[in-house]
Amino acid sequence: MDPVRKSTDTSPTGTGRSPARTGPSAAGARPSPARPGSPSAGSGPSTGPGPSTGDTAPTQDRTGQTRRARRRERLLTTATELFITRGYPATSIERICVTARVSIRAFYEEFEGREALLIALHNDVARSGMEAALTVLSDPATESAETRDRISALARAYVEAVTADPAATRIAFIEVIGAGRAVEDHRLLWRGLWTDFLIGEAARAVERGEAVRRDYALAMVALIGAVNELVGHWARNTSAFSPLMLADELVHHALAVLGLSAGPGVSVDGVARVDGARGGLVDEGK
């Protein structure tokens, strides 16, 4: 729950998988202007009817952009595989490039460095979580829902989004920790956005008479820390407990911050917990 990657899009709303930043075009992506004296410049006889440079340029440009986008995706995919198997600290740019079969020069056309690549990967997961939450809020039924139901829907949607790809989850909630100042600044930016979002939800609960009126700023920072730790724990123990159980736990934490409760021994669906359901939460490392 931690939205800057400098390589393409430094805003929290960037996807992390967009075409590369404006810069030197890939080789062959754009035809060079005709030199004076060349047939295309009008100095020689025509070779017959055919598309002009102006007609082919857009097609060639699109081809170059597609090739570059695929190269970028290959770097992101390769980095994900290496980061979760070797760890971010032990994975060099050279290793990523060799494995992805991309030149180091091409790497730097896409990213300013290894941290920028990690930020792009984190941003994909963080943005998907925020978009999932906003989609829930766009539902008219959620607008009038009680706080318990609203928090439950938000937690379920968020967890479903950020755990969709366990490898990406591990990158976003484990490998980013201690990865450098730029990465930490990026995480703090997302944390600020989520803090504001959750304070807004608390204010709504207060206005509805469902929560005590107080300053929730610090409480929401603490809640975000708990969310990050719990999702990271799931990423280390994906077989120990389900995303649904993770969402259930997050709901209990959020409601406790607001002074509410889903009820002892009852899940957010109103179904009694299975014996040992919390067991996976203490088996880290298995």
Image (cartoon, grey):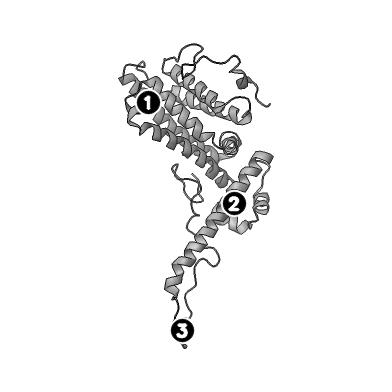
Q: Which residue is mark 3?
A: 48
54 is higher (above) or lower (below) than 86: below
* Residue density around tag 3, few if under 14, some if 14–19, many if 20 or more, within 10 Å: few
255 is higher (above) or lower (below) than 122: above
Question: Which tag, 1 or 3, sits closer to the chain's start?
Answer: 3
**Between marks 2 and 1, how big is the CA–CA gap?**
39 Å
In contact (CB < 8 Å): disc 2 and disc 3: no
Question: Which tag, 2 or 1, sits closer to the chain's start?
Answer: 2
Q: Position of residue 93 (x, y in %)?
A: 64, 50
Residue type (three-letter) at the residue carrying disc 1: Glu
Residue type (three-letter) at the residue carrying disc 3: Gly
Asked which secondary structure carries label 3, the reply is loop
Q: Residue at x 36, y 18 (%)?
A: 214
Q: Residue furthest front?
A: 271
Asked which secondary structure carries label 2, the reply is helix
- Residue 95 is left or right of residue 119, and the answer is right
